[in-house]
Image (spheres, rainbow, N blue to C red):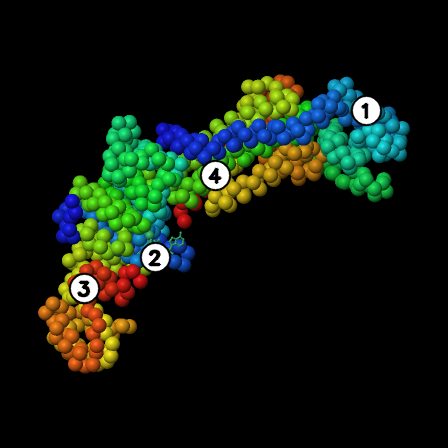
Amino acid sequence: MRDIAWIVLKDLRQQIRDRTIFIFGLIAPLAIAAALSLAFGDFFQNDEAVTFKFGVSNADSGGAISEGFGSALTALEQEGLVDITFYRDRTSLDEAVEEGEVDAGFFLPQGFSQAVIQGADAQITVVANPSSSVVTGVAASIARQFTLEVASASVAGATAAILAGLGPQQMIELGMAASQAPPTAQLAAVETQVRQLDGATYYSAGAAIFFTMFVVGTGLLSLLEERKRHTLARLLSTPITPGRILAAKFILSFVVGVGSVGLFMVFSGLLLGANWVDLPVTALLVMAAVAASAGIVSLVAGWARNAEQAQNFQSVVAVTMGILGGTFFPIAGGSTLLNALSLGTPHAWFMRGLGDLSGGGGLQEVTTPLLVLGGITVVTLTFSVLGARRSLRT
Amino acid sequence: MISPLSSLSSRESPPVLRVEDLRKSYGEIKAVTGISFEIAPGENYGLLGPNGAGKTTAIQMIAGVLAADGGRVTVCGQELTTGTTTVKSHIGWVPQEIALYDRLSARENLAFFGRMQGLSGKPLATRVSEVLELTGLVDRAGDKTIKFSGGMRRRLNIGIGLLHQPDLLILDEPTVGVDIQSRTRILDQVAEMTSLGMAVLYTTHYIEEVERLCQRVGIIDHGVLIAEGTRAELVKTVGERDRVTIAADGQINAGVGQITALDGVHEAGATTDGIQMLVDDAAHLLPRIIESLTRSGVTVTGVEVEEPNLEAVFLHLTGRALRD
Ligand SMILES: Nc1ncnc2c1ncn2[C@@H]1O[C@H](COP(=O)(O)OP(=O)(O)OP(=O)(O)O)[C@@H](O)[C@H]1O
Ligand SMILES: [Mg+2]
């Protein structure tokens, strides 16, 4: 263990001397928080109280299931999350959406309840304005979740119809068969994430986890720098094993990553008004997310051929996972594929964990995200040690 | 203390290093094709070969930083591969390239690698001071190595290899890019290590270094160990003859015919600007050679006599000069 500690100290000393640690550990988190606050500060301040406005038109009046949908929405309204307005028919609902009276609408066709009960093709149509994709996502996920929850076996599908912005004739019908939809739990996760984090916290959390991937690179990618400068070969001529060298790099990345993300969260709290609740559990989530990100980057470090390749690859991975993981915009309401892919990123689980936590409940609310993040760490580290070993054999 | 090339005294004790049928290819390139040799304690073994001969490849496998395709390396009785750990502290490997942390000082570099070799506390501090002394870097010990000259880096590069007083010191062309003074100093250090009982594996393409330093020499070419032995043994393979090179104009071919007939002259042949031959005793025969050349219409413009050395051995074995 001591040899690992000496490598960590050696790397730390180098990072201090070439100032990497100040840039990534201090200046970058401050700069990103400041930039976010300049870009969105006012918006978030006004945004706090904003709720989604949904319209509902129920052509299946009196049906057991469709009335249930109405009351589910009314329950959300009572929580202060949405405003619900009921419309007489589909035409007036479409008009309301188009004129911006409501952000999105739900249409339940005649015979909806009957169809659900008989297990026939029952659909809730989501009418949305394409200029507000976030709301569309929320609406679609509410509709899907409802159909899944009500009768996951008998409901054949729900359809989200998205107005293409060119008029109702050119509506695009997106068939979403229930069989293709991800399991209820996952949808719930995506939805709660959107529902529960306020804007400032949501974007700060996204920026934090996105930025993590780059911070952890500073420690791990030095492995390739060492290879280039022949010090790695020299290290390997001593009794230390490749796995221990990688462990040292991982530890330093983890420590710097946690420190720097922590600082960013403090700055974003101060500058943007991001609201971090339950600090001990949030800290656990941060650690798990940093570890998982470091695991992914160590995979890059272990398998890349040289430092340049690793750096480029790290950026590609960071941006791709950032998008898939919903750090820039919520992915709720995206395709089933997108939802599934997002679950492979530490980003999505970190966001989900924070979302779950914001509803109160503490540690047991976030056990799944913590376990998944831990799993990602273990798997990626295992493969990167294999990679580090292999790359010594040529 | 510099020990001259001499036959070996300590061959009886078990070898520090045993290399058996070591092999490595890079795709199509067969870098090392089945080399075997041994080094005894306190012995200085020179691996001599031209660029691309496979010296570095062989040495990296011996140091356990490159996986071999086949064969076996045994150090102090224990087998060594890239996966082994403890045995590695018996080896001090000085890579051909400079392998230093340039944002750390000379002292920090030494201390770090010393710790990786398992040294700590007082013994580590003592060794670091000794090596700084040995490499002449005491005055610059606290400077970051990024500020060092090439020669200073080379010296530190070597110093790290011998810090933990390994049983086997492996040096891969340690004197490349070093001025005469530093070079002499490095060679003296290596000789001193050997006299203290450390075994040394020394690669170079400088013949003088090998002649000065090594008790035994392996000649490597195209990945094959083509000859091995003490200097005296190797020289015998070319016959104990002097190599005479004559710069000349005129009837070269006629001249070659004439001198071939002389007793004691062997393998005479034309070169691009003269004639080359092996002579049993140049000091004695040279006047007659020149006379007979002049008579056959050759104008002699210069004469060079080389007593048999490893260069001649190499030339004899490969048909090429070492520094082609
Ligand atoms: N990493 C590598 N990939 C592909 N080929 C290599 C590699 N390293 C060495 N070679 C090839 O293997 C052969 C032996 O190279 P090596 O470096 O062992 O020679 P050397 O005797 O040390 O030469 P030098 O005196 O120039 O240092 C050469 O043909 C070289 O091109
Ligand atoms: Mg070499």
User: What residue is at 37 percent from the left and 30 percent from the top?
Assistant: A6
- Spatial CA distance of label 1 from label 2 is 79 Å
Callout 3: 10 Å neighbours few (<14), some, many (20+)?
some
- Spatial CA distance of label 3 from label 4 is 54 Å
Mark 1 and 4 residues: CB-CB less than 8 Å, in contact?
no
Q: Which residue is mark 1?
A: A84
Do pointers 1 and 2 mark residues of a single chain? no
Q: Which residue is mark 4?
A: A221
User: What residue is at 68 percent from the left and 26 percent from the top?
Assistant: A41
Q: Which residue is mark 3?
A: B306
Tag 4: amino acid: Leu
Q: Earlier in the sequence, mark 3 or mark 2?
A: 2
Residue A244 at x, y percent in the picture:
40, 34
Q: Earlier in the sequence, mark 1 or mark 4?
A: 1
- Quarter of the image holding residue A232? top left
Chain of residue at mark 4: A
Q: Which mark is residue B52?
A: 2
- Spatial CA distance of label 3 from label 2 is 26 Å
The C terminus of chain B sits in image quarter: bottom left
Is ligand 1 closer than 8 angstroms to the Cβ of mark 2? yes
Q: Secondary structure at mark 2?
A: loop
Q: Which mark is in front, 3 or 4?
A: 3
User: What residue is at 64 percent from the left and 21 percent from the top?
Assistant: A275
Tag 2: amino acid: Gly
Does residue A373 lie above or below B230 as drawn?
A: above
Tag 3: amino acid: Glu
Tag 1: amino acid: Ile
